Image: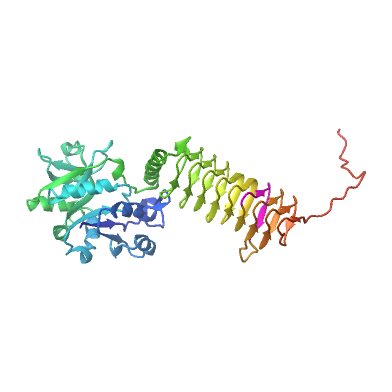
Amino acid sequence: MPAAIILAAGLGTRMRSALPKALHPIAGRPMLNHLVAACEPVFDRIVVVVGPGMPGLEAAARPHATVVQAERLGTGHAAAQAAPLLRDYPGDVAVLYADNPLIPTDTLRRLLARRAEAGLALLAMRPADAARYGRVVTDEAGAVLRVVEWADATAAERAIPLCNAGVVCAPAADLFRWLAAIRAENAKGEYYLPDVVALAVAEGRRVLAEEAAEADLAGANSRAELAGLEAQMQSRLRAAAMAGGATLTAPETVFLSWDTALGQDVTIGPHVVLGPGVTVEDEVEIRPFSHLESCLVRRGAIIGPYARLRPGTEVGEGAHVGNFVELKAALLGPGAKANHLTYLGDATIGAGSNIGAGTITCNYDGVHKHRTEIGAGAFIGSDTALVAPVRIGDRALVAAGSVITEDVPDDAMGIARGRQAVKPGRGFKGKKGR
């Protein structure tokens, strides 16, 4: 029954942001929540260490426990803040970082398996550019002797390709004893988590490193590094979508969210963005330059190009949403069509209805939102304004250019526009050309 401590108190100073670093999103989800989701199948208990005055971070961590690191005195000090909750825990405790959000669940399982072979286990990697990472020094049998920070390493130690990822795992009693023994004897006067390695070795404990891919252990301390994590996550999401039966004609231009759900034989054209909360059923086509968020698209529908589906929208089976059409909190029934230059907000459109170009539902009176209801098989002419609340009945016809302010019954025609007048001889008489 292992537990995890997630360090999330960082301010993100280098990001130049008022938002705590762990709340910066990747694929529409805070970094913290990506890591929590990877931990939940593995760890029986999760404790998140936050900084003072971070209610948003505490909310994101729920239902998991949080503790506050009142002073930021280093990673070892941060991990020690969880001692009141986990000191007497009967199993292993791993310490992870919220700004390393891409660690897969399988890697965490391997870390725990490695800990079962030793007194302490840590995650390590062999990055293409070792740069200023701390180096993991091992003996000939592969046991870890120490972790050396780059600034303190000799030339020979800096040549070691195995680098420390910072994650450690040990039995709870041992971990918190070692954390209590760490000293802040360094230039910054901080308590560093990797120092527990030397303490474990000094007690004669075997320490082993579990290697993982550099991409899985990547972190974000800047906006540029955050963009790198976003790119990695998008690559994972695109690969999963295509493996699941979706066609992405230009995958590098399609952006998905962490919870995007795509059915089989879905086709997504170039430059499509799917925000959080989107479900797309089988055989849907999403044409280029469309943007969807918090919506449901039923089987066989066609979306776009240049369509926008906003939260609360449901597009029915076989329905069409065409170019420059925006839907918000709208229910477009099966087989219904809105093919051109239309805004349907807070509206219900019945099955098989046709919405002409330039139609708008006038849903906002400046104070409240109101709904428009359009029945099945209705035909709404081009350039129509439907002033909500209003109902257009089944099989009703609304003449083009109308401003409809009253209900139109089933099988009726509604027309509301000024009568055309023709004035002979009153045509345009512009200046004669020079």
Residue sitting at 66 percent across and 53 percent down? Answer: 360
View extreme (right): residue: 425
The N terminus sits in image quarter:
bottom left
Q: Is residue 333 left or right of residue 180?
A: right
- Residue 33, placed above or below residue 81: above
Rendering coords of residue 32 (x, y %): 34, 54
Q: Is residue 231 left or right of residue 216?
A: right
- Residue 178, placed above or below residue 131: below
Judging depth in this view, the residue of 264 and 419 nearest the camera is: 264
Q: Magenta segment, principal secondary structure?
A: loop
Rendering coords of residue 53 (x, y %): 36, 65
Q: What coloring was used for the rendering? A: rainbow
Q: Which residues are magenta?
A: 351-363
View extreme (left): residue: 204
Question: Can I make out residue 66 in this image?
Answer: yes
Count every numbered label the image shows and give the total: 0
The image quadrant of residue 91 is bottom left
The C terminus sits in image quarter:
top right
Rendering coords of residue 56 (x, y %): 39, 62
The image quadrant of residue 227 is top left
Judging depth in this view, the residue of 142 and 345 nearest the camera is: 345
Judging depth in this view, the residue of 8 and 272 nearest the camera is: 272
Rendering coords of residue 148 (x, y %): 18, 45
Judging depth in this view, the residue of 113 and 88 nearest the camera is: 113
Q: Is residue 362 magenta?
A: yes
Question: Can I make out residue 345 in this image?
Answer: no
